[in-house]
Image (cartoon, rainbow, N blue to C red):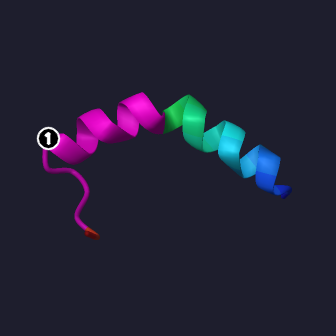
Amino acid sequence: MEASDVAACWEANAETWTRHARAGYDLYR
């Protein structure tokens, strides 16, 4: 996977990830 592909996946998921992390679902940090 190219770095640009990783960046695109991250950006596409950032809003959902942020919402879930703030709700306490990010158990690994």
Q: Residue furthest right?
A: 2
Q: Position of residue 14 (x, y in %)?
A: 45, 36
Residue hosting label 1: 23
Above or below residue 7? Residue 14 is: above
Q: Position of residue 24 (x, y in %)?
A: 14, 50
Q: Position of residue 11 (x, y in %)?
A: 57, 35
Q: Left or right: where does residue 23 sit relative to residue 18?
A: left
The majority secondary structure of the magenta stretch comes to helix
Residue at 26% in and 33% down: 19
Kindly indicate the quadrant of the structure image that contains residue 18. top left
Kindly indicate the quadrant of the structure image that contains residue 23. top left
The one nearer the camera, 23 or 8, is 8
* Amino acid of disc 1: Ala
Residue at 37% in and 40% down: 17
Q: Left or right: where does residue 17 sit relative to residue 12?
A: left
Q: Please check the rendered image and state whether residue 25 is part of the magenta-colored stretch, yes or no.
A: yes
Specify the quadrant that holds the C terminus.
Answer: bottom left
Q: State the count of labels.
A: 1
Specify the quadrant that holds the N terminus.
Answer: bottom right
Kindly indicate the quadrant of the structure image that contains residue 16. top left
Q: Position of residue 26 (x, y in %)?
A: 25, 57
Q: Please check the rendered image and state whether residue 29 is part of the magenta-colored stretch, yes or no.
A: no
Residue at 22% in and 64% down: 27
Q: SS of the residue at dot 1?
A: loop
Residue stretch rendered in magenta on the structure: 14-27
Above or below residue 5? Residue 28 is: below
Residue at 58% in and 30% down: 12
